[in-house]
Every structure is written in structure tokens, then in C-alpha cells.
Image (cartoon, helix red, strand yellow):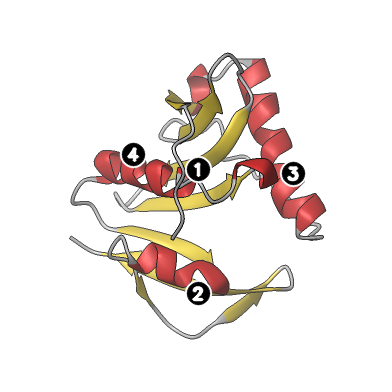
Amino acid sequence: MRTTQFPATLRRQWGLDLSPAQLYAILRLRQDVFVVEQNCVYADVDGRDLDQGTRHFWLESEGSHEPLAYLRLLEEADGTFRVGRVATARMARGRGFSRRLMQAALVDIGTAPSVLDAQTYVADFYASFGFVAEGAEFIEDGIPHLRMRRSP
């Protein structure tokens, strides 16, 4: 894994506290990565971004309010957390930003159970945080995924 120091500020915000400009910037990054780069047409705006228990984590460069990398953390009714929408802008990759975001999210998760649906090619990345594959590979929006779980 290659990590290069690059000054970036970690932001954490409850969904209901996001400004319109913050939400717009987050949605634009997710669209750039998931819809445009991965050529995957899907309903990214799923109604969960502004839920009561939704937390947004992102890294932004000094002097800019544009997210370089992003992660969404949902809190489900049963107390399980769901990590998702992990994305890094093309120009910011290889700097360990997703790792920093996962570390921050895991602080909020603590010892609670958590799940995620990993694109198969990054399953080892999530395994490095204690997530274990659960079940067989499946195709979501044309992309191979694995359901992964982290239990206390």
C-alpha cells in the first residue's frame, strides 16, 4: 500500500446538519466515482443521506471545501452500522484517504456489529479492519461484490 502525506482535513457531519453546499459536493464526488468512472447507472440518492442516524465523513484539502474522499455511515434500527459509499476522487487516490476515513468511522462504530457490501477487488482492504466475507460473491449494478461483516 502506498501512502503519501498530503494535507487533508477530516470532516464528520450528521446528515441533518449538512449544508446544501456540503451535500452537493458529496453527491458530486459520489456521482463522479460511481456513476461516471464506473459507468454504473444506479440510484445513488436513496433517501438515507439525511436520516437521523446517518453520519458523513470526508477529507478535504487545505483551503478547499471539496471532498477528496468520502464515506457514509448508517445506523440501522437494530444497532448495526452500515459502511457505504466509500469513494476517493481520482486525483487523490493512493494517499491512504480511505484508510483514514475507515479509521474514523470505526471510532463511531466502536464494538457494535457492522456490515458493508465491498466491491470484490477491495475486499482485502476491508478485511484489514476486521471485516469478514459473508456468503458468496454477488453482482450489484453489474459489479462483483461481497457482503462483509465485522462483529465485536
Considering only order in the chain, which callout, 3 or 1, is on the residue closer to the N terminus?
3
Q: CA distance from mark 1 to mark 4?
A: 10 Å
At 21% from the left and 46% from the top, the residue drawn is 110
Above or below — where is 69 with respect to 16?
below
Which amino acid type corresponds to the residue marked 2 in the rendered image? Leu
Q: Residues within 10 Å of mark 4 (few under 14, many from 20)?
A: some
Q: Position of residue 112 (x, y in %)?
A: 23, 52
Considering only order in the chain, which callout, 4 or 3, is on the residue closer to the N terminus?
3
Q: CA distance from mark 3 to mark 2?
A: 22 Å
Q: Nearer the viewer, mark 4 or mark 2?
A: 4
Question: Which residue corresponds to mark 4?
Answer: 104
Q: CA distance from mark 4 to mark 2?
A: 22 Å
Q: Which mark is residue 146?
A: 2
Of residues 78 and 115, the one nearer the viewer is 115
Which amino acid type corresponds to the residue marked 3 in the rendered image? Gln
Question: Which residue corresponds to mark 3?
Answer: 31
Question: Which residue corresponds to mark 1?
Answer: 71
Is the Cβ of the residue at disc 3 closer than 8 Å to that at disc 2? no
Considering only order in the chain, which callout, 2 or 3, is on the residue closer to the N terminus?
3
Considering only order in the chain, which callout, 2 or 1, is on the residue closer to the N terminus?
1
| Element marked by disc 4 | helix
- Asked if residue 71 lies left or right of residue 130, the reply is right
Is the Cβ of the residue at disc 1 closer than 8 Å to that at disc 4? yes
At 82% from the left and 60% from the top, the residue drawn is 39
